[in-house]
Image: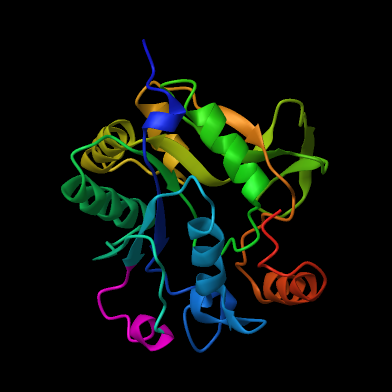
Amino acid sequence: MMLTSVDSIQHWAVIPASGVGQRMQADRPKQYLPLSDKTILQHTLERLLSHPEIDGAVLVLGEEDPLWERLQFSTDKPLLICHGGAQRQHSVYNGLLALHEHTKADPMVLIHDAVRPFVSHDDLSRLIELAGCQPDGALLAAPVADTLKLADDQAQVVQTQDRHNLWRALTPQAFRLSTILAALKSAIDQDLAITDDASAMELAGYHPRLVSSSSINFKITTADDLLLARYIVQIVPVGNSH
């Protein structure tokens, strides 16, 4: 299959941000929690949209989100807004549909968690380059470094798992719009449980490329994660793209 030159296609970020963040147990969805002088979501958007190869973004919000407009976020790149669905895969699918209706082209889409504000421009550049080299797409990931234990229902160790060739899937995950749109639609139509967008691609028979990412690209999910993020941002400001 002949692939289009990376330089000749557009790259759009798709950010699902309609979750309520129950594990954080905060008074607002975790993407709106403060991190230094801005919300986590603002930092994430600025990090993505400041990358020179990203042409625009689609932000997927909850239908009754009262907080987004209060941020008065501005950017000189296109920013499309749409509403999410029942689960993450439905929200991502809605975002992809919004982009499909916006453009006649088949851009590369970088689907990224709203609460990963530390992804580096270097990692984004490598992801864009490698995802553009094959039809199956690519995703940022990190090799598993810890010893893995399989437990029973009483939390007792059953055995130690071999971690060789095991990776933790991160985001962004990058695919051509038409391909991931079809893969997600198939998974949703079959009511299949998927935990990330690469899973939908795998179920459709694709084999995305793993691209090693910095460990600082973590997801802010719990109160401990937020404490760590607030410590890191004092040392390495989010605005430092590298």
Q: Please report the residue visible at 70 percent of the width from the left and 69 percent of the height from the top.
A: 225
**In this rendering, position of residue 170 left or right of residue 53:** right
Q: Give the quarter of the image for residue 6.
A: top left
Give the residues drawn in magenta, as a range: 61-71
| Percent coordinates x, y for residue 180 in the rendering | 33, 36
Q: Please report the residue visible at 39 percent of the width from the left and 18 percent of the height from the top.
A: 3
| Percent coordinates x, y for residue 117 in the rendering | 60, 63
Nearer the observer, 228 or 119: 119
| Percent coordinates x, y for residue 203 in the rendering | 38, 28
**In this rendering, position of residue 181 left or right of residue 126:** left
Q: Please report the residue visible at 38 percent of the width from the left and 57 percent of the height from the top.
A: 57
Q: Is residue 15 above or below residue 34?
A: above
| Percent coordinates x, y for residue 119 in the rendering | 63, 54
Nearer the observer, 201 or 121: 121
The question of residue 114 being in magenta is answered with no
Quadrant including the N terminus: top left
Nearer the observer, 114 or 70: 70
Total marks shown come to 0
Q: Is residue 45 above or below residue 73?
A: above
Q: Please report the residue visible at 64 percent of the width from the left and 43 percent of the height from the top.
A: 123
Instruction: Using the rendered image of the protein, determine whether residue 183 is visible from the camera's viewpoint.
Output: yes
Q: Is residue 154 above or below residue 36?
A: above
Q: How is the image coloured?
A: rainbow
**In this rendering, position of residue 125 left or right of residue 131:** right
Instruction: Using the rendered image of the protein, determine whether residue 169 is visible from the camera's viewpoint.
Output: no
Nearer the observer, 193 or 199: 199
The question of residue 66 being in magenta is answered with yes
